[in-house]
Image: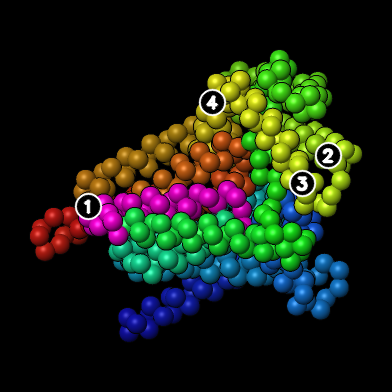
Amino acid sequence: MKKRSDAVFGVLLFLISMGFYLFFAFYDGAVICVDSPSYINMEISREPLYPMLLLLFRQVSSSASEGYLQGVAIFQSILAACAALSLTCFLGKELKLGKAVSLVVLMIPLLTSLLCRFAAKRASMYSNSILTEGIATSLFLLFSRYLIDYCIKGKKKALFTAAFISFLLISTRKQMVITVLLLISAIVWRSIREKTVKKGLLILTVCVLGIGTGSYFLDCGYNYCVRGSFSGHTNDNRFLSTVVIYASEKEDGEAIKRDDTRELFESIYEICDEGGYLMHSAGQGWYERSAHFGDYYDCIQIDTLWPALEQYVREHYEGDNASLERIVDDYNAQIIGALMPKVFPRLMRVFADNVLNGMVTTVAKKTPVLVWYSVVVYILYIVLLITHVKRNGLDGRAILAVYTLLAVMINVAVVSATIFCQTRYMIYNMPLFYISLVLLSGSFGTKPAVCAGGKGMV
């Protein structure tokens, strides 16, 4: 009877998750966003996996125009449903959760998606948006599910599955370098814990080299097939050059040795200065400063920096698109290299403001009221975690909570160093955070599990 009850409950969870995401896939349809055309058109500035996915659906679809994108939205919705269900079933089995708690765990990713759809005032959820988040948010949940499995039980199969998903994620979004950092942290922790440091270093090397080599050859192979050039995607360093320009003053340009690069910087700087885009035009207090940075980041990069460099390079150089984009990268690198020593102290202030913004945006929408809510919820999370560890040891719930907190901090730090912390970049850890919070809260009133030695189970 129990097995039958568990099977019926599993089917119920499946129907809830699948029904939820597929409903919005058909209700909203495939939603084209500002960045969508760059993936559809397979621009060289984009990582390869998502354009390849769109190409696959374009090739197999018989529908005209952009009808194939509905197929993409359905696929992404099924992936989102499977990721939420997989995480729920894993935690339910591993942490021996009751049916009611398992249902709550499943609902948290679904409610997070609803927040994106309604509270963030988007036209859609990420699962049916033609954006890398359409697959990356789901893949990150699956990555976390397998890496947490490795952290709890040391399963190598789970680790290598997480490493493969990391490869997929890095080939989708450069931000997902966070998965490699999390993977390294997990391997080092397990190796020290099991006192197998040499073996751990070997496994770490295999995983990191495998992910790096695989993503490099996929990137270059993709560009060779599409553009006839065995080289990676371009324009990664424009994010850092944007932040450097944001923190710069006009006299900083004197550090640029090449005349053409210095003149380009000065022309870009004047437009940004007149528009009030730069750091010295921000208000007082981290809330106002971080809001100013977020408001004008795209004005610097998309409206000013990128067009200026693209126009200059195409007017003064010849070659195919891939070659010209690498020249654009070279100009960005010159600006970064020359200005970074000058603006570094200011960059650290931007980074600090960004980190605070990112921590808030991970758990709530950034508003004056919800800033204070975020402070309270982080304090509550940490207090619950410390209390739980004292009571139960480093058990599965504690490992999930520690992993989540580390994932939040790594993601916030990586994003804060190069771009502003909008919801789109912070959403990855929101479901994990609230799942951990619920499970830590629900652990009180239960007796700590004990092993044969009489100590709290680890």
Q: Which residue is mark 1?
A: 392
Mark in the foreground, 2 or 4: 2
Q: Quadrant of residue 97?
A: bottom left
User: Which badge, 4 or 3, is on the more N-terminal residue?
Assistant: 3
The residue depicted at 36 percent of the width and 53 percent of the height is: 186
Is 197 above or below relative to 366?
Answer: below
Q: What are the residue bounds of the magenta stretch?
A: 171-199
Q: CA distance from mark 4 to mark 3?
A: 29 Å
Q: Which residue is mark 4?
A: 348
Residue 141 visible somewhere in the drawing: no
Residue pushed farthest left? 453
Q: CA distance from mark 1 to mark 4?
A: 39 Å
Residue density around tag 2, few if under 14, some if 14–19, many if 20 or more, within 10 Å: some
Mark in the foreground, 1 or 2: 2
Q: Please report contact status of discs 2 and 4: CB closer than 8 Å, yes or no.
A: no
User: Which badge, 1 or 4, is on the more N-terminal residue?
Assistant: 4
SS at mark 1 in the image: helix
Q: Please report contact status of discs 1 and 4: CB closer than 8 Å, yes or no.
A: no
SS at mark 3 in the image: helix
Kind of residue indicated by mark 2: Val
Residue 389 horizontal side relative to residue 106, left or right? left
Mark in the foreground, 1 or 3: 3
